[in-house]
Image: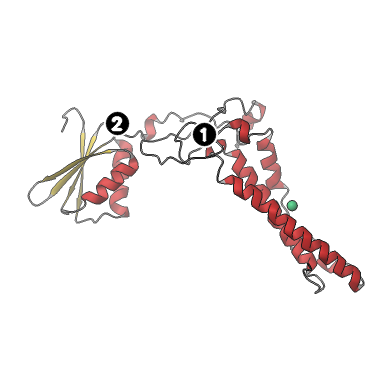
Amino acid sequence: MNNHNHCISLFTGNLYPSKELFLKLENAFLTANINDIIEVVSLKENIEIELRGWTKLKGHLYLGRENLGAQFSYKIQKISKNNFESSPSWGKELKGIETSNPKLKDLNLSHEILAKAPNSNGLLTRGMITQEGTPSYDFALSHKELVWSEPVSVLYEEGKNLQWNATTDIAWNEIPKLNPIIEKAICQIMTYLVENEFSALYIPGKFISQINPYYMEIPLFLSSLMNDEARHIEVFTKRAHAFGAGFQY
Ligand SMILES: [Fe+2]
């Protein structure tokens, strides 16, 4: 062990590898500095596999186990940055999506958004800090020019504000009763529309999971678009079934 690194000891007794144990570890690492060594002193002889797994997942370094007689010492060195106090985002504003800070409305919101999402940012969006060991995803759409459009933040806000409820916003009992041939013709049109709206729903759905979350506004906006399309499917279905004729061909 390198004596320059402050060593914190966590006494975990008979604790199995569990949420409780990992929460204790998590807390110890949050307050430790980079390169500090955290020692888990346990009565358990066989928690090495779980500690190794956790260490790898968190991007730290597992140093090994020592037999202390009745207890076992497992040492892990902090490698990944995750100290709240030194977080580089502290006090910075999020650029892009509408936040509750009205000052942002006056800024050129797209200005600080990179043309290409950083490599291996995992499922992180702008401003989050990548840690060692963050899983890497291969997002097909990782360039701004492939996904971005202004004013996406405004469109997203509108998409939320203009939502409606197909069950309660339409006076279903005021629809005039038509002769059966006309009613069936309307139901035929509704049938086409439902088919069409499914493609409107599935196409953005197909793209969402390929868009790098660095460009957060785009998947968020597309999901509000999908919300619209779901409503369209619902309302045309309800109309087709309003008088019992139902879907046609
Ligand atoms: Fe639609």
Q: In the image, what residue type sits under mark 2?
A: Ile
Question: Left or right of 205: which side holds 26?
Answer: left
> CB of mark 1 within 8 Å of CB of mark 2?
no
- Residue 173, numbered circle: none
Q: In the image, what residue type sits under mark 1?
A: Arg
Residue 212 placement (x, y as % from top left) = 54, 39
Residue 128 placement (x, y as % from top left) = 47, 35
Q: Which residue is mark 1?
A: 126
Q: In the rendered view, tell whether residue 231 sits above or below residue 65.
A: below
Tell us which disc is closer to us: 1 or 2.
1
186 or 235, nearer to the observer: 186
Within 10 Å of the Cα at label 2, are there few (<14), some (14-19), or many (20+) other Cα atoms?
some
Q: Is residue 10 visible?
A: yes
Task: Give the residue at x 80% y 62%.
Answer: 190
- Residue 34, numbered circle: 2
41 or 58, nearer to the observer: 58
Of helix, strand and loop, which one carries label 2? loop
Residue 12 placement (x, y as % from top left) = 21, 51
Q: Is residue 177 visible?
A: no
State which quarter of the image contains the N terminus. top left
102 or 79, nearer to the observer: 79
Instruction: Work out how far the residue at label 1 is from the one at label 2, CA to CA, in angstroms.
Output: 23 Å
Disc with the residue nearer the chain's start (1 vs 2): 2
Of helix, strand and loop, which one carries label 1? loop
